[in-house]
């Protein structure tokens, strides 16, 4: 997903997001956003309860892999009203365009991605992308601004944004599962290597200078 729109953009916050499926046609499709590899899909209608947050989640049940949630469409779009007979004199007098050429469209599967939350008690709007419960700021605003710039053909600005370098967060699940292995590797192995080198150097000096 190396695209100027999501270049340098961090985590995105959503609420009840859906998956997106694409079909084979002449429209060019670029996936802009995917979920992490720890994803689980459920069919609708379905009940969603916040009670699940009380228990520690098992990573093994989130095995559906990355899911597409935002896609960029580029190409010649055919109107849905093509080959339809206008039923009003007003529409008959208008110039109808059957196909929009060199067009762009971004489809996101959750409108909450661009919604400001209200403070849970005082009801004033929170900054876009801010989670008032975890107190974490997400990059929803930066992503949406990049979308607008790209759709407006502001290529110079997009090229400048693409040069931004931003560190990525580590995989917390992998850190939890492989913590002991990397602790041993970073703490024990270097010290053990130093001890073995010291013993080898001592044996070398003893063999070289131990006999007159």
Image (spheres, grey):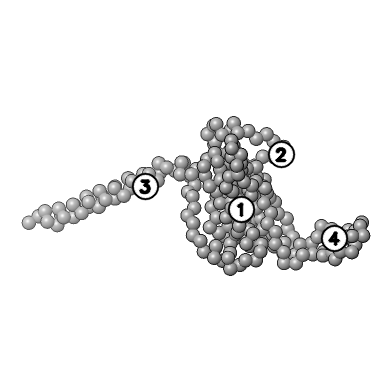
* Contact check, label 2 and label 3, Cβ < 8 Å: no
Residue 67 at x, y percent in the picture = 63, 48
Which tag, 4 or 2, sits closer to the chain's start? 2
> Residue at the location (26% across, 50% down)?
194
* Contact check, label 4 and label 2, Cβ < 8 Å: no
> Residue at the location (63% across, 58% down)?
147
Inter-mark Cα distance, 4 to 3:
65 Å
Which disc is residue 33 wearing?
A: 1
For the C terminus, the image quarter is: bottom left
Describe residue 121's horizontal placement relative to residue 95 as left or right.
left
- Of badges 4 and 2, the one in the foreground is 4
The residue carrying mark 2 is 44
Inter-mark Cα distance, 2 to 3:
46 Å
Nearest the camera: 155 or 60? 155
Residue 40 at x, y percent in the picture = 62, 41
For the N terminus, the image quarter is: bottom right
Inter-mark Cα distance, 4 to 2:
32 Å
- Of badges 4 and 3, the one in the foreground is 4
Element type at mark 3: helix
> Residue at the location (56% across, 43% down)?
131
Nearest the camera: 118 or 45? 118
Which tag, 1 or 4, sits closer to the chain's start? 1
- Of badges 1 and 3, the one in the foreground is 1
Q: Residues within 10 Å of mark 3 (few under 14, many from 20)?
A: few
Which residue reaches farthest bottom? 156
Element type at mark 4: loop
Which tag, 2 or 3, sits closer to the chain's start? 2
> Residue at the location (56% across, 45% down)?
130
The residue carrying mark 4 is 82
The residue carrying mark 3 is 185
Element type at mark 1: strand
* Contact check, label 2 and label 1, Cβ < 8 Å: no
């Amino acid at each position: 997903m190396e695209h100027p729109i999501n270049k340098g953009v961090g985590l995105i916050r959503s609420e009840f997001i859906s998956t997106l499926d694409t079909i084979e046609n002449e429209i060019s499709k670029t996936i802009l956003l995917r979920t992490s590899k720890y994803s689980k899909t459920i069919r609708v209608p379905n009940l969603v309860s916040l009670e699940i947050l009380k228990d520690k989640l098992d990573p093994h049940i989130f095995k559906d892999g990355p899911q597409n949630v935002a896609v960029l469409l580029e190409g010649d779009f055919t109107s849905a009203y093509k080959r339809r007979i206008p039923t009003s004199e007003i529409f008959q007098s208008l110039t109808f365009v059957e196909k929009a050429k060199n067009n762009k469209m971004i489809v996101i599967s959750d409108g909450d991605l661009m919604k400001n939350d209200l403070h849970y008690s005082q009801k004033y709007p929170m900054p876009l992308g801010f989670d008032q419960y975890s107190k974490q700021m997400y990059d929803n605003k930066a992503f949406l601004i990049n979308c607008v710039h790209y759709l407006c053909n502001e290529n110079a600005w997009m090229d400048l944004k693409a040069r931004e370098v931003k560190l990525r967060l580590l995989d917390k699940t992998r850190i939890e599962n492989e913590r002991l292995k990397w602790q041993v590797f970073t703490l024990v192995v270097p010290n053990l290597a130093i001890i073995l080198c010291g013993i080898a150097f001592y044996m070398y000096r003893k063999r070289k200078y131990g006999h007159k």
